[in-house]
Image (cartoon, rainbow, N blue to C red):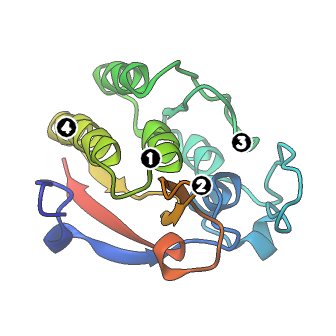
């Protein structure tokens, strides 16, 4: 955290992710506000991941039912089925540009899911220079979005990462292991 500004430790609160702490399960909990046992999106360890639809309403349906406009911005693939179709992007930079467009168009609820930090953590490990650099890019995106959005901004990763080492002692990242590194995540609340 010593290299971060907006996302520094002093600005963070701590949240508990899900078990398994993998993106579809955690994302479903975030967008429904319900645990995996209640929302129905869960997998046994090692189980093949199907594209599941939560059994409970999500925040998009909630907002739309109250007359609000929404935008759900995802990366290259869908992780769960939601009540609105996500806008997909080929990179986090494109996702960021989609978020800027959503702000300009006056959307009331904008849900942005950046994927590159997770991918970089898997490849190089969460404490690697590559992962730190990726987080700095994402932080700069978030700083700009917070400064432009007229409303509350909540930033939360869907899970953390553990550092493991392969047979050649090269670090890589993994999550879903029921450890505090992947289960406890920082979250931030900003007023734009």
Left or right of 62 in this view: 189? left
Q: Identify the residue shown where x is 38% and y is 24%.
A: 102
Do the residues under discs 3 and 2 have CB atoms within 8 angstroms?
yes
- Nearer the camera: disc 4 or disc 2: 4
First in sequence: mark 3 vs mark 2: 2
Percent position (x, y) of residue 14? Answer: 36, 77
First in sequence: mark 4 vs mark 1: 1
Q: Secondary structure at mark 4?
A: helix
The residue that label 2 is drawn on is: 31
The residue that label 3 is drawn on is: 82
The residue that label 1 is drawn on is: 124
Real-space CA distance between mark 4 and mark 1, rounded to the nearest whole angstrom: 21 Å
- Nearer the camera: disc 3 or disc 1: 1
Q: Residues within 10 Å of mark 3 (few under 14, many from 20)?
A: many
Q: Residues within 10 Å of mark 1 (few under 14, many from 20)?
A: some
* Foreground residue among 69 and 73: 73
- Nearer the camera: disc 2 or disc 1: 1
Real-space CA distance between mark 2 and mark 1, rounded to the nearest whole angstrom: 29 Å
Q: Quadrant of the N terminus?
A: bottom left
Percent position (x, y) of residue 140? Answer: 19, 37
- Nearer the camera: disc 4 or disc 1: 1
């Amino acid at each position: 955290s010593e290299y971060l500004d907006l996302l520094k430790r002093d600005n963070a609160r701590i949240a508990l992710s899900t078990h398994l702490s993998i993106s579809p399960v955690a994302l479903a909990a975030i967008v429904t506000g319900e645990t995996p046992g209640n929302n129905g999106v869960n997998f046994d360890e090692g189980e093949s991941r199907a594209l599941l639809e939560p059994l409970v309403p999500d925040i998009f349906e909630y907002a739309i039912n109250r007359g609000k406009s929404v935008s759900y911005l995802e990366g290259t693939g869908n992780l769960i089925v939601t009540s609105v179709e996500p806008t997909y992007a080929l990179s986090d930079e494109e996702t960021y540009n989609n978020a800027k467009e959503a702000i300009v168009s006056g959307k009331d609820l904008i849900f942005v899911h950046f994927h590159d930090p997770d991918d970089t953590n898997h490849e190089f490990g969460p404490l690697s220079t590559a992962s730190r650099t990726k987080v700095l890019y994402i932080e700069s995106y978030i700083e700009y979005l917070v400064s432009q959005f007229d409303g509350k901004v909540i930033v939360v990763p869907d899970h953390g990462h553990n550092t493991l080492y392969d047979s050649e002692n090269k670090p890589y990242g993994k999550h879903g292991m029921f450890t505090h590194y992947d289960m406890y995540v920082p979250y931030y609340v900003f007023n734009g």
